[in-house]
Image (cartoon, rainbow, N blue to C red):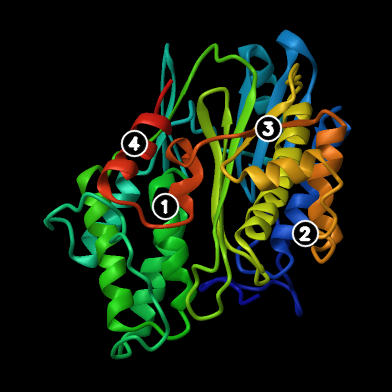
Amino acid sequence: MTLPPGFQATQPNQVCRLLRSLYGLKQACRQWNTKLTAALVDTCFTQSKSDPSLFTKGFGSSFIALLVYVDDILVASGDINLIHDLKHFLDTTFKIKDLGSLGFFFGIEANRCKSGLNLCQRKYTLDILHEAGFIDCKPASTSMVPGHHLMHGDSEALKDVGSYRRLVGRLLYLTATRSDISYAVQQLSQFIDAPTEKHLVAAHRVLRYIKAAPGEGIFYPVNNPIQLKSFSDSDWASFMETRKSITGYCVFFSNVLVFWKSKKQATVSKSSFEAEYRALATTVCEIQWLHSLLQDLHVQLMKPATLFCDNKSAVAIDENHVFHERTKHIEIDCHVIREKVSQGFIKLLSVSSDNQVADGFTKPLPISPFLYIYTDQMNRD
């Protein structure tokens, strides 16, 4: 390292002793994580296998959980003394800075009250609008125009490609608390290699939509019953260029949304049934991961996870293995659904298309069904 200005060396080849790790070194984050993990494990913390950044210790009223993101740490416990003891240990070992109660974490605002916890990204949303020049724009009622499909080369190519990529990247992080823009942002992210004017207009539509309610987020009420409920859906061959389908799913802990995703499937499906079947398999895997994470947090599920699907053929085939002709060409890993159904881990149920909550993650919806899903269903207590 370069010696500080004005430093007078008293001996030849004198060096400085490094007391703290420096940002920018390639191995700094890895070495810090290794040292922090070793220190926590030595104090009887258990590292989660489902999420290596989660550490837990104790049971019941003496339970404490610790979540690590590089050098930022969140601590939660029902006993404030356990939190004080942990903070004293970390300060003695690493010289930490105590920021007090959780209020703001990586652009996510946390507001606690007696009735529950509210998470939103209001400041982050306003920063996006201000940077894009949409702080005073006219709000839009939906995040995407119904029936609108984006394609490569559908209009004149953008000259400033970097601005489009930065905007989509910021919107992707906004989906951490805004499930209502997941599908639109997923579509926009398909064209970051060669964006056009139409893609930019669609991105501006999302900005106009979030302008209507920049403080929109998720509310987690207290004393919720312990039950996993999920919805899975797909839109067959909706990606016009490759004819691949879109998978959409959302998982509720009781009636509170905890996980959601809109994603293009990796392969082309021969029928709408196959697309639904692949979407179900993806959803089951996410439920399995969430179940393992809840076990690390000592949360026991007394009932099977309920999975709703609006394709009756997919539900029938998962419960009846006789329909071999329609499934013999599907990859073996997709048949994880049958295994979990036979084990009693999940319960497959059919739901009407009108009540399919995951429909908004697979296609742009008109105003009425859009508001029904993201206002009445997603935000209910």
- How would you rate the neighbour count of disc 3 (Cα within 10 Å): few for under 14, some for 14-19, many for 20 or more? many
- How would you rate the neighbour count of disc 2 (Cα within 10 Å): few for under 14, some for 14-19, many for 20 or more? few
Q: Nearer the viewer, mark 3 or mark 4?
A: 4
Q: Height in image: 154 above or below 116? A: below
Q: Position of residue 146 (x, y in %)?
A: 31, 59
Q: Which residue is mark 3?
A: 66
- How would you rate the neighbour count of disc 4 (Cα within 10 Å): few for under 14, some for 14-19, many for 20 or more? some
Q: Which residue is mark 2?
A: 326
Q: Of helix, strand and loop, which one carries label 4?
A: helix
Horizontal side, residue 118 vs residue 9: left or right: left
Q: CA distance from mark 1 to mark 4?
A: 21 Å
Quadrant hosting residue 98:
top right
- How would you rate the neighbour count of disc 1 (Cα within 10 Å): few for under 14, some for 14-19, many for 20 or more? many
Sequence-wise first label, 3 or 1 = 3
Q: Residue at x 56, y 71 (%)?
A: 4
Horizontal side, residue 96 vs residue 15: left or right: left
Numbered badge on residue 174: 1
Q: Position of residue 129 (x, y in %)?
A: 24, 58
Sequence-wise first label, 2 or 4 = 2
The amino acid pointed to by label 1 is Leu
Q: Do we see residue 260 in this rendering?
A: yes
Sequence-wise first label, 1 or 2 = 1
The amino acid pointed to by label 2 is Arg
Q: Position of residue 231 (x, y in %)?
A: 57, 39
Q: Nearer the viewer, mark 1 or mark 4?
A: 4
- Closer-to-camera residue (57/150): 150
Sequence-wise first label, 1 or 4 = 1
Q: Nearer the viewer, mark 1 or mark 2?
A: 2
